[in-house]
Amino acid sequence: MNLRQRLFRASIWYPDAIPVDEWKTRNQKRVWWPLYDGIVMAMGLWAIGFGSPLMHRLFTNTIIDIAGGTLFLAGVVCSLGVAFPRLWRMELIGKSVVFTLLVVYAGLVGIFSVYPAYENGFVVLGLVLMCLPALMRLDLLGEEIKERRDEAKKAEETTDAE
């Protein structure tokens, strides 16, 4: 088996990658989370390449580049964690970084908006909206962690009982 075949077998797109009891979430794992992560990467690259008038009013180019680079890298890390379920810890870290960056940016835009203070409300709400999928995924990952711990505990108890 060559490397490409091994990678495909380890990926979320392999036919047996998703257990039957999780079949209802297959499109989230195979389509929507990778798409979200791709948009996050695009946002990071856009910030580095162009920024926005709002960003340039609030931050220096260096800060915009660092934040954009961090957002891009977090998206890459998330993508790897989504694509290869064994790397779920990477996705957990990446989604936490994405969530944090978006929340901080939304907060800073809201706090440092000058008169009229409501002029950037649409942008702030849009950023908060972008946070929700990351927060939902973090919640799902947390539930999966609990399930893994419960299964490990049951396996340990079964081993101890024998």
Image (cartoon, rainbow, N blue to C red):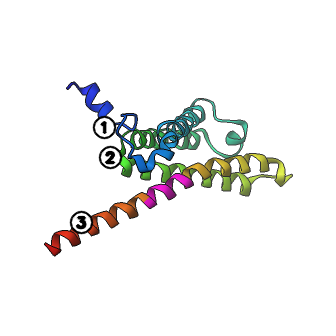
Residue at point 40%, 34% (across, down): 13
Is residue 102 visible to us here? no
**Element under label 3?**
helix
Q: Badge 1 is on which residue?
A: 10
State yes or no: residue 109 in magenta: no
Q: Which corner quadrant holds the C terminus?
A: bottom left
- Badge 2 crowding class, 10 Å Cα cut-off, few under 14, some 14 to 19, many 20 or more, is some
How far apart are labels 1 and 3 at the CA level?
A: 24 Å
Residue at point 71%, 43% (across, down): 57
State yes or no: residue 139 in magenta: yes
Q: In which quarter of the image is residue 84?
A: top left
Q: Residue 155 carries which label?
A: 3
Amino acid bearing label 3: Ala
> Residue 44, percent across and down?
55, 37
Residue at point 48%, 42% (across, down): 26
> Residue 38, percent across and down?
52, 34
Q: In which quarter of the image is residue 141?
A: bottom left
**Vertical placement of residue 149 versus 136, above or below:** below
Q: Predominant secondary structure in magenta?
A: helix
**Vertical placement of residue 109 versus 154, above or below:** above
- Badge 3 crowding class, 10 Å Cα cut-off, few under 14, some 14 to 19, many 20 or more, is few
How far apart are labels 2 and 3 at the CA level?
A: 19 Å
**Element under label 1?**
helix
* Residue farthest along the left direction in this orientation: 162
Check whether the beta carbons of the residues at disc 1 and disc 2 lie within 8 A of each other: yes
Q: Depth check: give the residue in front, 99 or 36.
A: 36
State the extent of the magenta-drawn residues as a range.
136-143
Relative side of 117 to 93, left or right: right
Amino acid bearing label 1: Ala
